[in-house]
Every structure is written in structure tokens, then in C-alpha cells.
Image (cartoon, coloured by chain):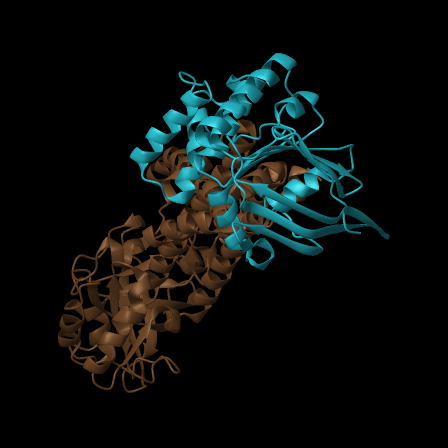
Chain colours: A brown, B cyan
């Protein structure tokens, strides 16, 4: 029998036991829904987390002195930053390239002294996508230009220092030659990143203020932070840039912040395990359905073999049935998922009530988790889920299909 | 229709032994039997005499323990599974006791299915199937599925399906067993007519005396041996001694 005729027979067979077929479709639909929603949540939250880590750190890709990673001091700087930023911006995946200088400093007020992690930046080069929390002020104003005066403090750090807007802050750090230097600025703003550990340590300066204090040239910084439209392309962009930047090191975000990479890898791995468990459960349900339907039709298959169907044709018939089940299940899963996905993609799911009183624990490596879960699936992951549903269903059908072709006509027809 | 002298189907010394637990069951004990083109033969005998086993051997559904089965000169025991499927598809028609139509196909599609397997063009299929359904008295019922047909009508579809491939022989296992007497008579009338008009060769296994009344050749089986073989038209009875 040619393909279309087997397909017609298979489609009708699928609906002989409507209730069982519908139950199987429900299980495929629910499994697909869970896999899709879980993946969308993970994709979005990890992408945001990585972007946040890139903001707090030094971009998705960082150009820095080759020795900076091992000993991050301001003496290990990058020269000609303007040319290198221009070079990076030639890559179509690069959205921003900015000068940054960061490191440890001691902040002192009239009342107290605390260690801090400072980031010096050029407000005119940055954007909300590269340094959102520099805009998240709870008091005061953000910087507008690299020549502005003042210092921004994290909310908890300001409390610890007993500093308010306009108060003097003396910051002490080592300059490009390793000497201890000090500067003094007034508090221009107090910001909140949402991550308690960051708010207790962060201090921000206009980059030219820092350049003056540590003796940097106008096109010199400790790092160039490069931001991409998709953080997953960091490796590719870094590979392209590496031969172009002379002796500087070009590192991806996960090389600069391995603890973030380990955390994301652990969470992604956990999500994959859950998806595999869902897939196996769905496949087991499909297997039992298809196998049961084959066993129930043993006599029918015997008759079909007797009248001239070949074992291969019966195998293909059951595989057609399984294929229709998979495709129909996929359509149902897509239809069922579309509405909730659209809502969650648009509005998110606010979980802040569940974390009430636990705000200080909602950051990893100083990067805050947004309590509003966002959903946005990478297209390739959506395709992988769709392909996995079809593949798992088809795999579940192979053994029953093989059994269909191995039926003994004499025994099954029971004419002996 | 008068049977020709050259057998289209020949069983030579066919023995079939089944193993049931630790016991060997001798279903056939050296059966020699020739079926000629145009035969309208009934195989009868008590339960367990081997009637269905003979049909299984003739229909390439089962392999003999010893002996050979030749269909149009081809030793069925020498064929692969695939070749046996093709042989059943192209040269053998089956009619089963419980009709055994494919339930999701209409009467038309059931009759057509074998031709589709054979790769017959759609237009030719349509002409042949419509002709067959008319021959078996089912015109107007082509689009009905098996559950929408009576037992007799389903058996007619099964006969149309068996004839569709222009087989060398049609093997019918107790074809009237599930039918009432009136329907059985009509069905046997129809098969006798198809035998006469189309030259179709029929071999039945049966308990039904009506079938034996219609049959022109009656083969008696006892304990897995051919006990008698009567050509009724010629009035000549050939007694066969089965081989042990």
C-alpha cells in the first residue's frame, strides 16, 4: 500500500479508541506545556541573570590587561580604549562597548570607614541595558557625563557609613603605579540594586574622576565592557576580537565570573533533568497507549498479514499512527501553551510574596534575582522541545510497531 | 466451471506437528492433495481433523513440518517472509469465518485495499471494485463501514476483497459458520456463480452440509489424513490413503 493509503488507515485507527487517544493527547499536551513553560522561564531568567551579571561585572565580553584576571589592580590597564571600543562595535552582535574601571577602595566618612567595590564609568557611553542600576536611585541623581562630580553609594553601604546626600566621602585606593592615593567626593545619589550584598559594597564614580585620581590617560581604563544582543554569542564575539586587540586579553562573562557560570550551569542542568523526566514520563504513557492498541489488534494484524500486508507495511502503519499522535499532540500542546505563555511573557509572574522577608538571600554573586518571573523562550529551544515531543513519541512507537509486524497470522487468527 | 487437469495448488506428503507442552500433536499426517483451476472444493471433517491446518498450509500462513506445498509450481517452503506476503497478496484470496474486514475502512476501501497493496492504478481499482461489489450484490453500500453491514453483507465484502487481486485460489474457512441458513444459501449461490462466471477457484473448510451440497468436490479429512476425495459432477470417488 502506498504511503497516503497507510496514512489514511493510520489516522482512522487513531480515532477508534477516542477516549484513549484523547487521554494520550492530554498527557502529551501537558508534558509539552510544562517543558515549554519551564524552558521559557529558565531561558528568560538566566538570560536576565547573565545580563545583570554582565552589567555588574564588565559586559558579556571584556577586554582587559592579560594579567588583570589573576591580579586585578589598576596598574594593569588597557590603553587606546577608544579604538578598541570602535573595533568591537564593528561586530553586528555588539550593542555597546564602554570603558570601565573597577576595584576595591576604602570609603571613609566623618563617622565610619568601610571597604567597597567601586565601578567608574562614562554615563554617556552607558545605557539602561548596560548599567541599569546606576539609574535605580532611591535618593539623589545619577551621573550625566564622565566629568560630573560626586559619588553614588549602595543603599546599605550609605547606611553603614552614615552618609546622606551631600556628605563628604574620602576614598582611598592604589593608583596605576601601585601607590596609595585618595580622593574626596560628595554623595550625589544612593542606589538600590536589589541584591543586598551588592548594596552593601557598591560605590560608583564618573570615570574621569577616577582617571584624575589614579593617573590614567583619557583613553585608558582597567577594562572595556562589551555588551551583546544575546549573551550566548559571547564566545563567538570574543574569538573574533582576540586577534584584533594586540596583547590584551579578551574574556567572556563566564571566564570573568566563573561563579556565575557555575550557578547557571547548575540551574540549567537541573532544568534539563526535569525536562528529561517529563519527557520520559510522557514517552512511557505514549508507549503504553500504542503498545496496548497493538496488542488489542493482534488478530487484525494477523488478518492483514494473511491477506497480503507485509510486516514492513504493518510497522509503517503503526509508525504513521504514532506520528499522527505526535503531531496532533504537538498541535494541542502549542495551542494550550500559547495563551498562558503570552500572558506570562507579557505580565510575568510575581513571586515576591513567596520571598517576603528573604530579600537578602535573593542574589547570587551579588547579582539580584528579579522576584517577577519573566518568560521568553529562545526560538531554538522551542524547536528542540517540539522536536523532542515528536522524537519521544516516535521512539515510543518503534517497539509496538515492530511487534505488529511480527504477529503470527496463524496464532492470531486462531484458525488452528 | 470444470476443473482443469493441471493442479494450481499441490500438497505432497505434508505433515504438520505442533508442540503443545511436552506433547507432539500431529495435525496433518502426510497429506497429498491437488487443487485444480476452477475447483469448487469443500474440505470437511470432524473438529481436530486438520481442515484449518490444510488451509493454513495452502494459504502460505504456516510451514509444513515435512512435505511440500506448491502454488503454481512454486514451493512455498522456499520463500522468504516478504515473498510469502507477496504470494498471499497476489495469488491467494482469504475469506474468514468472522469476516475480518478492516473496521475503519468502508466496503469499497476494504475491497480496494489489496489492489492498493498491489499498486494497481486508482482508476483501474475503481472499475474493478465497483464491478466486484456489483457481482456480490453490494451496489449502493460501498461507503458503509463493516459495523453498518449485516453479517452476510460483510462476508460478501470479504469475498469481493478476496477476488480483488485475481488470485489463483480463494481459501474460505467456515465461511457460513456465522450466518443464518437463508444468508448462507445466498452466499453459496453467489460463490457458485462466481466460480462459474469468473472461473474463480474456491476451497472451503466446513462442517456445514449446505456447503457440501454446493461443492462439486468434497475432500474428507480424518485424523490429519485425506480419507476421501469425491468429484461429485463426475460421480467418481477417489479414496486416498494418507501417509503416516
Q: Residue at x 43, y 61 (%)?
A: A366
- Could you tell me if residue B224 is visible in this image? yes
Q: Nearer the viewer, residue A4 or B94?
A: B94
* Figure quadrant of residue A111: bottom left
Disc tally is 0
Residue B97 image point, x, y percent: 63, 29
Residue A162 image point, x, y percent: 41, 57
> Considering only vertical position in the picture, is A296 above or below A143?
above
Q: Residue at x 53, y 54 (%)?
A: B74
- Which residue ends up furthest to the top in the rendered image? B182
> Considering only vertical position in the picture, is B149 above or below A316?
above
Q: Nearer the viewer, residue A397 or B165?
A: B165
Residue B57 image point, x, y percent: 64, 46
Q: Nearer the viewer, residue B166 or B35?
A: B35
* Figure quadrant of residue B3: top right
From the viewer's perspective, tell me whether residue A30 is left or right of residue B25: left
- Which residue ends up furthest to the right in the rendered image? B22
Q: Residue at x 41, y 44 (%)?
A: B118
* Figure quadrant of residue A177: bottom left
From the viewer's perspective, tell me whether residue B136 is left or right of residue B36: left
From the viewer's perspective, tell me whether residue A318 is left or right of residue B237: left
- Could you tell me if residue A213 is visible in this image? no
Q: Nearer the viewer, residue A67 or A22?
A: A22
Residue B44 image point, x, y percent: 71, 32
Q: Residue at x 19, y 80 (%)?
A: A244
Amino acid at each position: 500500500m502506498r504511503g497516503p493509503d497507510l496514512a489514511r488507515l493510520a489516522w482512522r485507527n487513531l480515532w477508534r479508541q477516542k477516549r484513549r487517544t484523547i487521554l494520550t493527547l492530554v498527557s502529551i499536551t501537558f508534558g509539552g506545556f510544562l517543558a515549554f513553560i519551564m524552558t521559557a522561564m529558565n531561558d528568560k531568567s538566566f538570560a536576565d541573570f547573565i545580563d545583570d551579571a554582565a552589567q555588574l561585572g564588565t559586559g558579556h565580553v571584556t577586554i582587559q590587561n592579560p594579567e588583570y584576571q589573576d591580579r586585578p589592580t589598576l596598574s594593569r590597564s588597557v590603553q587606546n580604549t577608544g579604538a578598541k571600543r570602535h573595533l568591537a562595535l564593528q561586530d553586528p552582535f555588539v550593542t555597546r562597548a564602554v570603558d570601565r574601571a573597577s576595584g576595591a577602595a576604602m570609603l571613609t566618612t566623618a563617622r565610619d570607614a568601610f571597604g567597597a567595590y567601586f565601578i567608574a564609568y562614562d554615563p554617556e557611553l552607558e545605557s539602561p541595558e548596560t548599567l541599569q542600576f546606576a539609574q535605580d536611585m532611591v535618593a539623589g541623581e545619577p551621573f550625566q557625563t564622565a566629568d560630573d562630580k560626586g559619588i553614588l553609594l549602595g543603599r546599605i553601604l550609605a547606611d553603614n557609613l552614615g552618609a546622606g546626600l551631600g556628605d563628604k566621602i574620602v576614598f582611598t585606593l592604589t593608583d596605576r603605579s601601585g601607590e596609595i592615593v585618595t580622593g574626596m567626593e560628595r554623595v550625589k545619589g544612593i542606589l538600590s540594586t536589589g541584591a543586598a550584598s551588592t548594596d552593601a559594597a557598591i560605590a560608583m564614580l564618573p570615570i574621569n574622576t577616577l582617571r584624575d585620581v589614579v593617573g590614567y590617560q583619557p583613553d585608558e581604563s582597567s577594562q572595556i565592557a562589551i555588551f551583546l544582543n544575546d549573551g550566548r554569542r559571547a564566545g563567538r564575539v570574543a574569538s573574533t576580537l582576540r586577534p584584533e586587540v594586540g596583547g590584551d586579553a579578551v574574556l567572556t562573562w563566564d571566564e570573568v565570573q566563573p561563579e556565575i557560570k557555575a550557578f547557571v550551569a547548575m540551574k540549567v542542568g537541573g532544568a534539563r533533568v526535569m525536562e528529561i523526566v517529563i519527557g520520559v514520563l510522557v514517552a512511557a504513557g505514549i508507549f503504553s497507549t500504542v503498545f496496548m492498541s497493538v496488542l488489542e489488534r493482534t488478530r487484525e494484524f494477523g488478518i492483514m498479514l494473511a491477506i497480503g500486508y507485509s510486516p514492513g507495511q504493518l510497522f509503517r502503519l503503526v509508525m504513521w499512527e504514532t506520528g499522527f499522535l505526535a503531531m496532533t499532540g504537538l498541535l494541542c500542546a502549542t495551542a494550550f501553551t500559547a495563551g498562558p505563555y503570552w500572558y506570562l511573557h507579557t505580565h510575568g509572574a510575581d513571586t515576591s510574596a513567596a520571598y517576603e522577608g528573604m530579600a537578602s538571600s535573593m542574589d547570587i554573586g551579588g547579582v539580584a534575582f528579579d522576584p517577577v518571573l519573566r518568560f521568553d523562550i529562545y526560538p531554538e529551544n522551542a524547536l528542540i522541545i517540539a522536536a523532542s515531543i515528536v522524537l519521544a513519541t516516535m521512539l515510543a512507537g518503534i517497539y509496538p510497531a515492530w511487534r505488529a509486524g511480527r504477529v503470527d497470522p496463524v496464532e492470531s487468527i486462531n484458525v488452528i | 466451471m470444470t476443473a482443469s487437469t493441471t493442479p494450481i495448488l499441490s500438497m505432497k506428503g505434508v505433515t504438520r506437528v505442533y508442540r503443545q507442552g511436552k506433547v507432539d500433536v500431529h495435525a496433518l499426517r502426510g497429506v497429498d492433495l491437488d487443487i485444480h483451476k476452477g475447483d469448487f472444493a469443500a474440505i470437511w471433517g470432524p473438529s481436530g481433523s486438520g481442515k484449518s491446518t490444510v488451509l493454513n498450509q495452502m494459504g502460505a500462513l504456516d510451514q509444513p513440518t515435512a512435505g511440500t506445498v506448491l502454488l503454481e509450481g512454486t514451493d512455498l517452503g522456499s520463500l522468504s517472509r516478504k515473498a510469502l506476503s507477496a504470494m498471499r497478496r497476489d495469488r491467494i484470496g482469504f475469506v474468514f469465518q468472522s469476516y475480518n474486514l478492516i473496521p475503519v475502512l468502508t466496503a469499497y476501501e476494504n475491497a480496494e485495499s489489496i489492489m492498493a497493496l498491489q499498486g494497481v492504478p486508482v482508476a483501474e481499482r475503481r472499475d474493478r471494485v465497483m464491478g466486484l461489489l456489483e457481482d456480490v450484490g453490494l451496489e449502493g453500500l460501498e461507503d458503509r463501514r463493516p459495523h453498518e453491514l449485516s453479517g452476510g453483507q460483510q462476508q460478501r465484502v470479504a469475498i469481493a476483497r478476496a477476488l480483488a487481486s485475481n488470485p489463483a485460489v480463494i481459501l474460505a474457512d467456515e465461511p457460513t459458520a456465522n450466518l443464518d441458513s437463508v444468508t448462507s444459501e445466498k452466499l453459496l449461490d453467489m460463490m457458485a456463480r462466481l466460480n462459474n462466471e469468473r472461473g474463480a477457484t474456491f476451497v472451503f473448510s466446513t462442517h456445514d452440509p449446505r456447503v457440501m451440497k454446493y461443492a462439486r468436490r468434497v475432500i474428507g479429512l480424518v485424523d490429519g489424513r485425506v480419507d476421501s476425495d469425491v468429484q461429485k459432477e463426475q460421480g467418481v470417488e477417489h479414496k486416498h490413503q494418507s501417509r503416516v
